[in-house]
Amino acid sequence: MNYIKNQKNSFFISMSSLLLMLVMINISCSQKSNKTSSQSDQSDTSIKIAYPNWAEGIAFTHLAQAALLDKGYKVKITPMEPGPIYAALAKGGYDIMMDAWLPNTHNDYWAKYGDKLEKIGESFSDGTTGLVVPAYVEINSIEELNANADRFDGKIMGIESGAGIHANTEKAIEEYALDFKQITSSGPAMLASLKRAYAKKEPIIITGWKPHYMWGDYELKYLDDPKGVYPKDVCAIITRKDFKKDNPVVGEFLTNFNMKEPDLIDLLAKIKESDDTEIAAKKWYNNHKELVESWMPEKMKANK
């Protein structure tokens, strides 16, 4: 009888343990299902942002990083050339690019990768590109360049060969039959050339764009482009396929993210003046929190 009693006791203990385990599993699952969508957005996987080494791309990216870090997200940012950025997003290895010049300047990249990407917002809605000269240069149109080629040594100072403005400048040389060669370098190298020439009031032509802090540092002007080689664009926010579906709270923030020119010029200036881009962007974010939080959904604002 004691043996049977002990067996019954063991059975009830085992059943009690099993029931307790099922209750705990149910509670755990319930807690997980009751998470807000902003909490589910904040996974252990970093949000990966790739950005081109252009002043505005650096600014947009570091501002977004500062805001997301402040709200508890993990963020990884990586500088790349534009071509590899589009390829990385298309393959799903990265999530976001804050500075895609669309629909025109980056048209070739979009034609190649666009079916695997999504445009979800605009960091800046009034992007322009073209050939830029200091205001003291006494010509005003691309059509005047050949008559003054010797003054510029037949050179146009450009940036990376993968940039859309580089391709458009090659097109401009062909369309206008210019006796000029584009010098391929980088954004910083091109700006260094501008700084040297400007200090001596020497003629120089660069491939320029807005938004950029150069317009605050120097008196510059675009050369008229009657053939329309250099189009107007937006600085688009593009993502890998289904990023917004996978990360709805961050996706809504990026859709709302849009800088006006005065704010962007101020951010560009603060970053330029600083030795640490991340610290400068974080400080600007803290000083303009009301603006940046106006782009955030309520569930993101609540995160600390």
Image (cartoon, grey):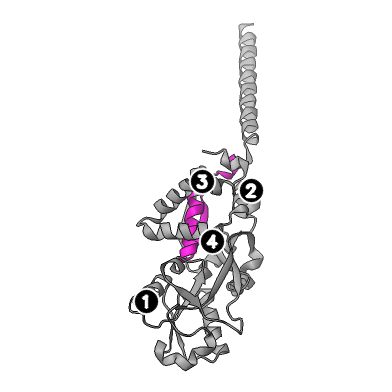
Q: Position of residue 139 (x, y in %)?
A: 48, 85
Residue 276: where, in percent of width, then height?
Answer: 37, 55
Q: Judge left or right: residue 191 versus residue 296.
A: left
For the residues bearing labels 1 and 3, Cβ distance under 8 angstroms: no
Give 5 or 153, whichever is nearer the viewer.
153
Q: Which residue is mark 4?
A: 261
Question: What element does badge 2 sit on?
Answer: helix
For disc 3, the marked residue is: 289
Is label 2 in contact with label 1 (beta carbons under 8 Å)?
no
Image vertical order of residue 119 relative to residue 302, above or below: below
Query: Which residue in the protein does label 2 denote?
Result: 248
- Taking the image as shown, residue 62 lies to the left or right of residue 251, namely left
Real-space Cα separation, disc 3 to disc 4, in angstroms: 17 Å
Q: Amino acid at mark 3?
A: Lys
Residue 242 sits in quarter: bottom right
Residue depicted at 57% across the width and 38% down the height = 302
Residue drawn at (57%, 68%) of the image: 127
In the rendered view, tell whether residue 70 sits above or below residue 81.
above
The CA distance from mark 3 to mark 2 is 21 Å
Amino acid identity at mark 1: Tyr
Q: Earlier in the sequence, mark 3 or mark 2?
A: 2
Where residue 260 appears, as percent x and y from the top left, is 56, 58
In the rendered image, the vertical position of residue 190 relative to residue 216, given as above or below = below
Mark 2: few, some, or many residues within 10 Å (few <14, many ≥20)?
Answer: some
| Mark 4 surroundings: few (<14), some (14-19) or many (≥20) residues within 10 A | some
